Amino acid sequence: MARFTLPRDIYWGKGTLETLKTLKGNKAIVVVGGGSMKRFGFLDKVVNNLKEAGMEVQLFENVEPDPSVETVMRGAAAMREFQPDWIIAMGGGSPIDAAKAMWVFYEYPETSFEEIIQPFSFPTLRQKAKFLAIPSTSGTATEVTAFSVITDYEKGIKYPLADFNITPDVAVVDPELAETMPKKLTAHTGMDALTHAIEAYVSTLHCPFTDPLAIQAIQMVFKYLKNSYDGDMAAREQMHYAQCLAGMAFSNALLGIVHSMAHKTGAAYKNGHIVHGCANAMYLPKVIKYNSKNPEAAKRYAEIALAAGLTGETTEELVEALIQKIRAYNVSLNIPSCIKEYENGMVPEDEFLEKLPRVAELAIGDACTGSNPRIPTQEEMEKLLKCCYYDLEVDF
């Protein structure tokens, strides 16, 4: 039996923060990140709208990028004390992801983090609260997905948590929030959205419900991302919707090894994180080449190429055209072609090679690997990661 799950309500368009005035409840906790939502006045709007709805409001602020297990537990403790019936998460992927995990430990304090690492193993939520998400970036689409990524810094591992229980009840997709994104964030989140849509389309779990969402998202990203990056706010609005469509697709079709590798390289190296959207952008062309050895995957990449207006006489030519289009897009968005070039050589070669076997092993075990069209061996994953480090041709 297959399943397709989305939030019950998605409010979209400029000014949709007004929707919060119509919520029914007594107490709302608002989970936010580092301060951009406050700086640009959006946090005040949200708080005032909730108060107008007759709710008592409490803030949980300063969720860090790539939120930690510790932050999640602190937030859950704050919720247990305040007892909200609405959890409102706003900002980029990090505060929304963190709030989703907090929700579990708010309602089930006895549950351990280890118990929910296994995909689709969550206890039944909505015993105490409903969840509303307001994205400010155009990439993660966590406002419509069954996913949350939480980092265990002691182990240096990012865990993608997955369960339809954490699909939000309401998403408020207001493009005015995305207008505040800096250029680099616009590029990285946009390529994250493209990766979501492409991986969902070739996933072994794709279906007639997810395919049209994925294709529409891909067409919109190729049409609008560069202009959005260059500061065109009409294009920025369309990207905010495109990433949401991509999210609806991958939340149900799941993802592939671009994400497995991004999750497991993201927090692995001592000098700092490889930003998730940037990692996806660097790895995507390599994975397309690797996966295209699978005839069904190659056929579907060719369909994507045709939908994106690319030309080729054969499936192979179309797949190559798609790879080159993505590489050219990365160049135009100032995204490096490989890990070695990332942030002026932030990941030294000796550390990369030393950690390679373990990172490869963890990537194979990542929750996103199972729906990839080709399941790599340890040797293949190590080779693939080397291709992503040195920008080598994938020929296996």
Image: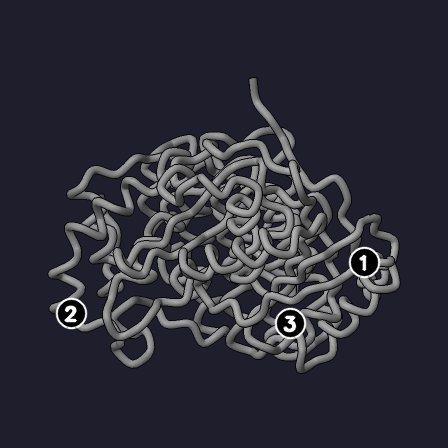
Q: Nearer the viewer, residue 342 or 294?
A: 342
Rendered image quadrant of residue 209: top right
Q: Residue at x 63, y 30 (%)?
A: 4
Does 130 sit above or below residue 348?
above
The amino acid type of the residue labelled 2 equals: Glu
Which SS class for mark 1?
A: loop
Residue 246 in the image, given as x and y percentages of width and height: 60, 48
Q: Work out whether residue 151 can be spotted.
A: yes
Q: Which residue in the structure is indicated by mark 1?
A: 55
Residue 180 in the image, given as x and y percentages of width and height: 66, 77
Q: Residues within 10 Å of mark 3 (few under 14, many from 20)?
A: many
Numbered badge on residue 349: 2
18 relative position to 168: left or right: right
Q: Earlier in the sequence, mark 2 or mark 1?
A: 1
Cα distance between the residues tagged 3 and 1: 36 Å
Which SS class for mark 3?
A: helix
Residue 32 in the image, given as x and y percentages of width and height: 60, 67
Q: Residues within 10 Å of mark 1 (few under 14, many from 20)?
A: many
Q: Residues within 10 Å of mark 2 (few under 14, many from 20)?
A: few
Q: Which residue in the structure is indicated by mark 3?
A: 228
Cα distance between the residues tagged 2 and 3: 34 Å
Q: Nearer the viewer, residue 293 or 104?
A: 104
Total count of labels: 3
Q: Earlier in the sequence, mark 3 or mark 1?
A: 1
Residue 30 in the image, given as x and y percentages of width and height: 66, 62
